[in-house]
Amino acid sequence: MPRECDNCRVDSATRTRAGLPGIAVFAPSTLATVTIEDGGAQPEIHFHAGGQGVWVAHMAAELGAEVSLSTVLGGESGRLLSGLLEAEHVTVHAVHGSTANGVYVHDRRRGKRVVVAQTAAPRLQRHELDELYGIALTEGLRRGVACLTGPQRPGVLEPSVYARLSADLRRNGATVVADLTGPPLEAALEGGIDVLKLSEAELVAGEWADGTGVAAIVNGLRRLERAGAHVVIASRGPRPAIAVVGGRLLELRGPRFTAAETGGTGDAMVGAIAVSLARGQEVEEALRLGAAAGAINATRHGLGTGCRGQVESLARGVTLRPFAAPLPAANQQAGTAGA
């Protein structure tokens, strides 16, 4: 069943009558995470399932969706993850992996994350990948909305998998929501993406934008739209996010909070956007819910977390308005001269 916080319970009879939105998450790299916190007299040590796919699934479950997670689990860390994932309130479809899952240990006793130790996610073997692909495809088609998340590192799987998966899902009626960068993003664009979320830093790192100025970010969003993403949203930290929707340029404005942790906000946004689309809501409503989920997540220390009631309440205060990007300096000068 979906996760519910104690202060934001949803009546089960109402939920059953209304039907639950279905989300399928493709997660090639699931990680075992160990975080050391300041507990006063002695440290607190927390164990969780992690990785981009898990954090997306976590938020979607928080918001009341029936979530399936397609992943690979192997070795000692995979056995640990099997138990940890039971607490995530998602349906796990796990392929047996021949190699242990990646692990990280972070020390956050002084307020910031310090990496103590980490191991890399393994490269998926052919039979593992074939089985994972089949599960992700059938679950995506069964649920209707599929979230594609990326590998922990290059080399986990061939990027072409994303081209095939996005194309197969969309041509058979599923909606594809993606949070990808680098070669996996370039491949997924070949198959087509319904909603793509990136940060402005990822736009620059992927060379879609040549800087973090507004004109450069807008140009990067337009390039991604032409490349195969129908809706593209760029988060910009504390500044309003910018999105291209049906050719229209929009700005998302909502409350601003002091961040306790910036990690995981993008994953929270993606999970919330997918849930809204699965509910049958328009993409503008999906973007509002996504912006609210990202803002709430930033106030928390957990990744991909947030109370459903708080997120939905905050979403009502998020506004979308047409956004006019400034012209590059050279064009502004030329326009002034010709006026």
Image (cartoon, grey):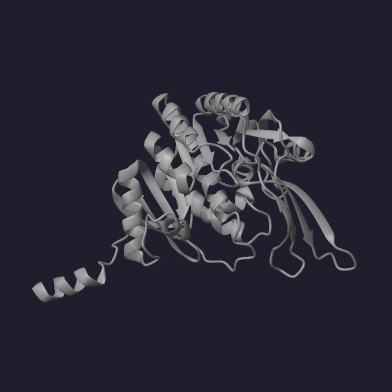
The residue shown at (38%, 37%) is 190
249 versus 156 height, above or below: below
Left or right: residue 209 versus residue 256 is left
Tell me where residue 252 sits by quadrant.
Answer: bottom left
Residue appearing at x 35%, y 55% in the figure: 220
Up-down: is 234 above or below 142? below
Quarter of image, res 123: top right
Image coordinates of residue 59 in percent, x first then y, are 61, 46
- Regarding residue 183, the answer to whether it shows in the image is yes
User: Which of 225 and 78 lies nearest the eye of the viewer?
Assistant: 78
From the top left corner, tell me how far across and down residue 269 is, in percent.
53, 50
Q: Is residue 313 visible?
A: no
The answer to which of 252 and 317 lies nearer the viewer is 252
> Residue 258's x, y, as percent?
59, 69
On-image quarter of the N terminus: top right
Total marks in image: 0
Residue 243 horizontal/vertical position (percent): 38, 53
Q: Residue furthest left?
A: 338
Q: Residue at x 38, y 45 (%)?
A: 231
In front of the other: 30 or 97: 97
**From the image, which quarter does the C terminus lie in?**
bottom left
State left or right for residue 208 relative to residue 311. Answer: left
Farthest residue in the right direction?
A: 41
